[in-house]
Structures are given as C-alpha cells and as structure tokens.
Amino acid sequence: MPLTKKILILGDSISAAFGMATEDGWAYLIQQKINQHSMPFNLINQSINGETSNGGLARINSLLQKHLPTLVIIELGANDALHGMPPEVIKDNLHELISRCQKLGAQVLLLALQTSNNYGDTYRSHFYQNYTALANEMNCLLAPDILSELNKKEELLQADGLHPTSAAQPLIAKKVWRYLLPLIKPVE
C-alpha cells in the first residue's frame, strides 16, 4: 500500500460544514469517496467559519509546514466580498496563497464562488473573474461556481440564504469530486 498523501482544505464556512454535523459536510463526503476507491489520500479540513483570504494567509505557512500536503483545496473569498474588500485585494491574497502552496510543491484546486450582488454587477463580475484569471496565471485547476445548483432551490439553503443545507452537500461534493479526481487518480 502506498504512503498516504495529504489533501489540505483551506476554506470558510462552506467547507467547514456550517450549521450541520461535520459528517454531513462535502469534505467528509469526499473523504468517503476517496476511501471507497481505496485511494491513498487523507483530507485535512482546516476550514473556519468566517475565514477570509487574510486569515488564510495568516495560517497557510504553519499549515503547510505541519501537514506537508501534496494538494491544497482553496475555497476562500466569499467573506472578503461580504465585507466589501476590493476584488483586486482578494485576487492578490489568493495569488499569494496559491504561490505559497506551489512553492512547497503542492498542487492547488481553487474552488470558485459567486458573491451576492450587494456591491453591484461590476463588483460581482470582477470578484468572480478573479478565480478564472488566477487559475490561468497560476496554472492551477479551477472548479467553477461550486454552489451554482443551490441558488435554484431554496430548500438547499439554510434560513440565512447563504449557507448550504446538509441536503446540498452531496451536490457540492459531486462537483468538487469531478475536479479533484483527475488530480488524485492513479496513472494507469
């Protein structure tokens, strides 16, 4: 059996299973898929409710040193947008996060999110374009809007209208898995 490799998840409440048991969250469901396929990967979910890209930057070096991941899933930016942080600053922070991971030799899967329209269409468009631009600039894989299916069905969102319910977690896991699998699938 090959040595177990580590996948670090650095995210906010979307990845931290806000409002539900950890076992209901998409990260746990992904680990179950990995186990079902007998793949030598262990997910280390270091997501925190309310996390921002600044918070991720403050923690990333110690997390990389502690866990030595072969892959990092980054799901950050939404809380920055909720606080009105300029999209350019969010992009710079995400760029630095990706850069630090890649310097360690870790692959990066960037999970893109849409933001609410609180600051207008121009802000929303620039915010979302950050993810595509970063994936192209940094040569990392992008999972586009991982919550897109949820906005169509109210029952998939908690009462706050922002956080997915436990019923939504398999949909998120399925989308993330589609982009994660090529990065961890054994070469045949």
Image (tube, grey):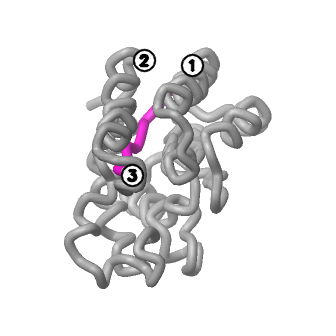
Nearer the N terminus, badge 1 or badge 2?
1
Q: Local crowd at mark 3 within 10 Å, few (<14), some, or many (≥20)?
A: many
- Residue on which the image places disc 1: 99
Nearer the N terminus, badge 3 or badge 1?
1
Query: Label 1 sits on what residue type?
Result: Ser
- Residue on which the image places disc 2: 138
Front residue of 128 and 110: 128
- Please state the horizontal and vertical placement of residue 185, each as a whole percent of the image: 34, 39
- Please state the horizontal and vertical placement of residue 82, each as a whole percent of the image: 52, 53
The span picked out in magenta is: 106-114
Q: Please indicate whether residue 128 sits to the left or right of residue 89 in the image.
A: left
> Is there a contact, CB below 8 Å, between mark 1 and mark 2?
yes
What is the distance, in whole Å, between disc 1 and disc 2 at their CAs? 8 Å
Query: Label 2 sits on what residue type?
Result: Met
Q: Residue at x 51, y 65 (%)?
A: 28
Front residue of 176 and 68: 176
